[in-house]
Amino acid sequence: MSDAAAAQGRGPRRRGFMLILSSPSGAGKTTLTRMLLQTKALDLTLSISVTTRPRRSSEVDGIHYSFVTRRQFEAMRDSGDLLEWAEVHGNCYGTPREPVEKVLADGRDVLFDIDYQGAQQVRQKAGADVVTIFILPPSMRELRARLERRAEDPPDVIARRLENARNEISRWTQYDYVLVNRDLNETFNELRAIVSSERSRAARSREAIGAIVEELLSQP
Ligand code: 5GP
């Protein structure tokens, strides 16, 4: 079945799953996320996080993040509106619960660009409906070069992100899949293959497959 057929429900109807991508800053995750979302046939919906981090000039409020004050963030967190949250590089980030639940209830899949702390919390809450992927950079030198090329953060922020990268990289063992991003197109193809296989997992469509099998077995 093609990506499109699976996404449009021409395969057995199934529960949506949560696809979590994590990596240290600069490993290519943002570009890969964009490539996945631009592939309409995959029909992935991005979970838009809330953050207290200042907006970068290239970012649009409500598209890349919802930018909030610390007070607003704490109010959301304290009233249980966040599926998960974490402090990353000195700022707070969190996933609003309601939009995710709506997409999943519709049988569609949600893509998350969140860190290892968030991945752990979502895994604890949603278990089998979560697929986690960690993207590694090919080398620390390349990671530094990508952060500097991006030139969107001041030098002290870049230095802090590089420092944190070592801790983040050491979390790879908690992920279902680990990809080394040597070549964007290759990594993208690997990601597509993972999405495709995960969509075919029998456990996600047990009821629908049961009905198909019943129909098959009723035939002479
Ligand atoms: P950035 O500031 O570069 O956009 O993101 C910094 C880090 O925060 C990235 O590793 C990103 O995956 C993570 N992040 C973004 N949104 C969330 C979120 O809602 N929850 C968690 N736990 N991490 C997030």
Image (cartoon, grey):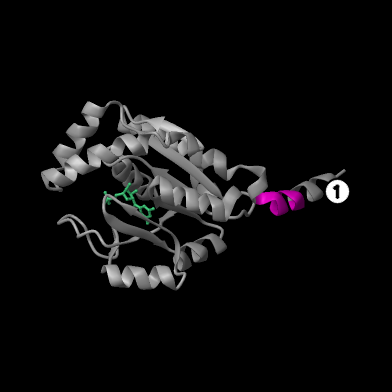
Give percent across and percent down for residue 132: 48, 43
Q: Is residue 9 visible?
A: no
Q: Observer-nearest residue: 143 or 16?
A: 143
Quadrant of the rendering where the C terminus is positioned: top right
Local packing at callout 1 (Cα closer than 10 Å; few below 14, some 14-19, many 20+) is few
What number of labels is visible? 1
Q: Is 159 covered by the magenta stretch?
A: no
Amino acid marked by disc 1 = Ser
Tell me the residue that label 1 is attached to. 218
Where is residue 197, by image quadrant?
Answer: top right
Q: Is residue 122 left or right of residue 65?
A: right
- Residue drawn where x is 38% and y is 50% of the image: 114
- Residue drawn where x is 18% and y is 42% of the image: 158
Give percent across and percent down for residue 2: 52, 42
Give percent across and percent down for residue 149: 14, 38
Residue at the extreme right: 220
- Residue drawn where x is 33% and y is 44% of the image: 35
Q: Which residues are magenta?
A: 205-211
Judged from the image, the secondary structure of the residue bearing numbered disc 1 is: helix
- Residue drawn where x is 26% and y is 62% of the image: 52
Where is residue 171, by image quadrant?
Answer: top left
Prevailing secondary structure class for the magenta stretch in the rendered image: helix
> Measured along the vertical axis of the image, is residue 206 above or below residue 54?
above
Give percent across and percent down for residue 189: 41, 34
> Measured along the vertical axis of the image, is residue 163 above or below residue 99?
above
Answer yes or no: disc 1 within 8 Å of ligand 1: no
> Measured along the vertical axis of the image, is residue 115 above or below residue 73?
above
Q: Is residue 72 visible?
A: yes
Quadrant of the rendering where the N terminus is positioned: top right
Where is residue 48, by image quadrant?
Answer: bottom left
Q: Observer-nearest residue: 210 or 19?
A: 19
